[in-house]
Image (cartoon, rainbow, N blue to C red):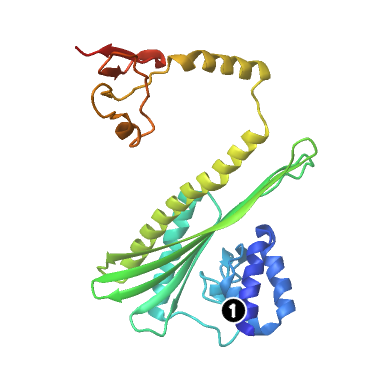
Amino acid sequence: MSEEQFDACLDLMRRLAPPSTSANLARLVQIVGPSLEEELYSAVDQPLQASKCVATGKEYLKCDYNRDGKSYRSPWSDQYDPPIVDGTHPSERLRKLEIAANEAFDVYRELYYDGGISSVYLWDTDEKGVFAGVVLIKKAIGASTDGTGGESGAWDSIHVVEVQERGRVATYKLTSTVILNILHGGHPAAGELNLSGNLTRQAEQDLPVDDFAAHVRNIGRIIEDMELKMRNSLHEIYFGKTKDIANDLRNVQSLAEARKQANIQAELRPYIVQVYFTVCIVTAGGKDFADLFFSQSSSYALHSLPPGRQTRFLRPSVAGHIEDSAAA
């Protein structure tokens, strides 16, 4: 029964409004009880929440991957807030790589997003030679406070990567999710536009590893390529489709211009060049080959032959007219 409830919860979350994912998930957990709480929070991607590290004062992002109970681990100090005694921490070797990855992606975020917050978390797995991690990036803009409406939105990138080391080569399995939320409106004359959704893609790639620190470079390269692809895809799906729908709903062209354009098209239509294949039809003293030609393609133009002509050729011409000539 728990598996059926879990599938039903995921199906319900897919049908609810994306901007209210966190609130809807919390209500859903209250309904189904604590038995499915961990599974639901792990399976449902939520917009990232920011917090401030108590030890360093730097901001970091909270997610299910740095959560232990009700506490969240800071990537800058490796401490939990609120503090706990037996919290999960990466190994010393992996912690050094985590520090280097946070510094690298902090530069990446500043160059690509011109602000925002980024966090990288790494953890050990039970399988030998395999570790995993997540790269989080959030960029948000706020709405205006002057009562005239405005824009607000957020871009959340969640990149989960699994690394399997095999000597001088490592296999990287990446699962990337982008959560996009854009709200424009508040002005009585303009109305309100809410554009929200998420996109998930996966990739796998083998890259050379000279030393353990090379994982930062390889992970960064894979994530950079994936984000570029997803950004282009979102631009086509979200913004391109929304623009097409808006253009269909509201025609900015005047009626006079539309009529003028229709008249020009009507004038040019007879002068369109139509190309016909040359067809030879024998009608006197033998079998009519017209059926053979016209049964193969509907693009052939049938031209009736006057009495007394044995053959007649159809030639390409301009303005849609067929010129014919008699054979000797």
Residue extending farthest to the left is 328
In what quadrant of the picture does the C terminus appear?
A: top left
Vertical relation: 140 (above or below) 315: below
**Is residue 82 something that shows in the picture?**
no
In the image: residue 76, left or right of residue 148:
left
In the image: residue 90, left or right of residue 305:
right
Q: Residue 84: x percent and y percent?
A: 61, 84
Residue with the mark numbered 1: 39
Q: Residue 285: x percent and y percent?
A: 23, 23
SS for dot 1: helix
Which residue is more in the foreground, 256 or 92? 256
Residue extending farthest to the bottom is 86
Q: Residue 41: x percent and y percent?
A: 61, 74
**Is residue 231 something that shows in the picture?**
yes
Q: Residue 266: x percent and y percent?
A: 53, 16
Which residue is located at x 65 percent, y 73 percent?
Answer: 9
Which residue is more in the foreground, 79 or 126? 126
In what quadrant of the picture does the N terminus appear?
A: bottom right
In the image: residue 2, left or right of residue 148:
left
Q: Mark 1: few, some, or many residues within 10 Å (few <14, many ≥20)?
A: few
Q: In which quarter of the image is residue 126?
A: bottom left
Which residue is more in the foreground, 69 or 236? 236
Which residue is located at x 71 percent, y 72 percent?
Answer: 26
Vertical relation: 220 (above or below) 92: above
